[in-house]
Image (cartoon, rainbow, N blue to C red):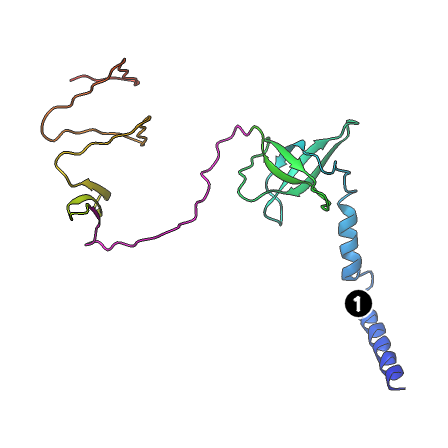
């Protein structure tokens, strides 16, 4: 009897809650169902084999890690859908992408960019080690005998690397490239000598010789 009375009270409470809802208001479950229906029919993707799609947008209104792709079936029907991407990919609208539906999944996953012509940002790198320097501190590398070789400090102009020996050389087996927004070579005392076993090329918009 106790269980029957309790079930009756719950039924009456549910009836009262429904009666308190405004006329024409939908329940959350019904509203969610309408949202799912408004998304359109889910496309039939090829399962197990990769296929090529085009990115049409990277700005999902609510979710991160998804891009909108456009895919044309063998029958010529075009469809657009928001799909997840592998972490770390730099994708731009207009890129051709390689996607695949793994076995057991219901939607494609973007695996990579085939031909992205837009400039790509540098990937974020995890900091494996960190050393904090005070203004009056320096990092120094010494030889086994205690002879100072290289020093890294922070001065008023920024980071400064000092080679602490009077005569120092940089020896590279392959090609050495130095890249910067501006490059300045200054001989404080003495001459500058450039030697090569092949041609020496100086390329610039304007070359000024003193």
**Residue 29, quarter of picture:** bottom right
Q: Quadrant of the C terminus?
A: top left
Q: Position of residue 174 (x, y in %)?
A: 33, 26
Identified at 65% across, 39% down, the residue is 68
Towards the viewer: 87 or 28: 87
Residue 127 shown in magenta? yes
Identified at 53% across, 38% down, the residue is 90
Towards the viewer: 201 or 61: 201
**Residue 101, quarter of picture:** top right
In the displayed image of the protein, which residue is found farthest to the front? 144
Badge 1: few (under 14), some or many (20 or more) residues near its Cα, within 10 Å? few
The residue that disc 1 covers is: 21
Q: Position of residue 55 (x, y in %)?
A: 62, 34
Q: Quadrant of the N terminus?
A: bottom right
Q: Is residue 60 above or below residue 116?
A: below
In the displayed image of the protein, which residue is found farthest to the bottom? 1
Residue 12 shown in magenta? no
In the displayed image of the protein, which residue is found farthest to the top? 199
Q: Which residues are magenta?
A: 116-142
Q: Is residue 125 above or below residue 20?
A: above
Identified at 86% across, 86% down, the residue is 2
Horizontally, residue 149 falls left or right of residue 173, namely left
Q: Main secondary structure of the magenta part?
A: loop
Towards the viewer: 62 or 102: 102
Q: Position of residue 47 (x, y in %)?
A: 74, 38
Q: SS class of the residue under badge 1?
A: loop
Q: Is residue 8 above or below residue 103?
A: below
**Residue 165, quarter of picture:** top left
Q: Position of residue 20 (x, y in %)?
A: 80, 71
């Amino acid at each position: 009897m106790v269980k029957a009375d309790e079930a009756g009270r719950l039924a009456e409470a549910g009836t009262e809650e429904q009666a308190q809802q405004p006329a024409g208001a939908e329940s959350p479950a019904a509203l969610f169902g309408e949202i799912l229906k408004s998304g359109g029919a889910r496309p039939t993707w090829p399962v197990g084999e990769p296929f090529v799609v085009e990115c049409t947008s990277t700005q999902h209104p609510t979710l991160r890690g998804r891009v909108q792709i456009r895919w044309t079936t063998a029958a010529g029907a075009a469809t657009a859908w928001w799909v997840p991407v592998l972490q770390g990919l730099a994708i731009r609208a207009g890129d051709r992408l390689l996607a695949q539906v793994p076995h057991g999944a219901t939607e494609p996953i973007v695996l990579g960019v085939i031909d992205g012509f837009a400039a790509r940002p540098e990937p974020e790198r995890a900091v494996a080690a960190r050393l904090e320097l005070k203004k009056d501190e320096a990092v120094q590398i010494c030889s086994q005998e205690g002879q100072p070789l290289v020093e890294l400090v922070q001065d008023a102009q920024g980071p400064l690397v000092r080679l602490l020996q009077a005569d120092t050389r940089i020896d590279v087996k392959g090609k050495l490239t130095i890249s910067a927004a501006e490059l300045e070579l200054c001989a404080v005392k003495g001459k500058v000598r450039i030697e090569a076993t092949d041609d020496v090329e100086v390329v610039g918009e304007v070359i000024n010789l003193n």
